Amino acid sequence: MTNSHSDTGYKNCIQHVDLAQTNPTDIVELAEDQKDFSCVVNTPESQRLCGIQTKDGIRKVYCYDLSMRYWQDTGLENILTLCNNTDGSITAVRQISSNEVALVSVTTSGYTRSQMPPMAHRYELPANIKPEALTRYSGVQSGASQLLLSADNGNNSFAPVVLDLQSSKVHVGEQIQATALIPFWTITDKKDNGITKYVRTGGYAVVTDGQTELRLWDQATMTLKEPFATFPNPARSITMLAEDTETLKLYILFDTNRSGRLIYAYDLVSKDWQSVPGIGYPYSEIVMAR
């Protein structure tokens, strides 16, 4: 996605980066009132990208069908960000008051204002976290009971914000001096009675001093673990590819010191960085689409 947050002179559009090809191909150019299409997530196997557009000052959820090539207004309004869930569904974080948010399910059946889907738990944000601070990045579900969000406090300061899916509790992690704090999900393995099990967990890409650290979130201690990988450029967007236990990669869009951006994949099996061909990408966000 190249949107109004891209800081480039490139046209606002959605492109397909085919990992087997050198040159990206255009999918659709964004109209003037679509140019801030952001916080984009993918509905697996649906061939739809869902993101947020601001219309008449209101943040709304729109989906683009990659197969049929059309836009759909889901009817959801006052949305701060979108989140990928462990079951492949999408949750929207909706602002319902000056200090309160609620979770609603994103569907593609076209809800109207009088048919809003039922809201799950409501969450009262602490005084030091404003709802608009949650709008910079999309969130992820980590394990069965936590939703990981990122709060931009301004002045190069971020904090992890965790919503408990089994209650109405909000946990705000330690404030971090950083220029980006990007939630991501990944697959980790662990031994259980000698049997290797694969589980989905969440983490954050932490950008400090111009470099990126990939750190998992410890759901028990509610803290960030030590970095499991680092890269010498600042991350801008991150997305996960999980085809099977041998194909587990985090694709990351990085800023460079020169014009344009680059994309690298961190292979969670071989534990090394792999370059995606090409440089000078104008994107603000990338997402693994199916």
Image (tube, helix red, strand yellow):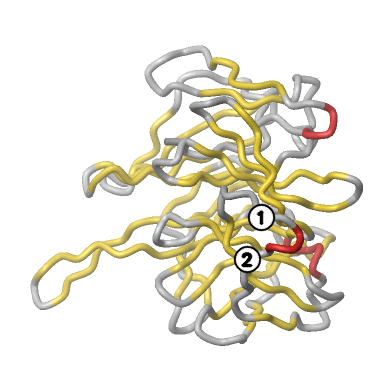
> In the rendered structure, which amino acid carries the disc numbered 2?
Pro
Residue under the point 75% across and 50% down? 60
Disc 1, disc 2: CB below 8 Å?
yes
**Above or below — where is 135 with respect to 51?**
below
Q: Position of residue 264 (x, y in %)?
A: 47, 34
> Which residue has dot 1 on it?
111
Horizontal side of 201 relative to 78 (left or right) equals left
Q: Nearer the viewer, residue 50 or 127?
A: 50
Residue 212 in percent (x, y) is at 57, 49
Residue placed at 58% from the left, 56% from the top? 106
The amino acid at mark 1 is Tyr
Quarter that holds the N terminus:
top right
- Left or right of 227? Residue 52 is right
Outermost residue, left side:
194
- Residue under numbered circle 2: 117
Q: Is residue 182 left or right of residue 264?
A: right
Q: Answer above or below: position of 47 versus 208.
A: above
Name the residue nearer the viewer: 201 or 65: 65
> In the drawing, what numbered circle is on residue 86?
none
Q: Nearer the viewer, residue 138 or 42?
A: 42
Is residue 235 visible in the rendered structure shown here?
Answer: no
Image coordinates for residue 64, horizontal then vertical, percent: 60, 35
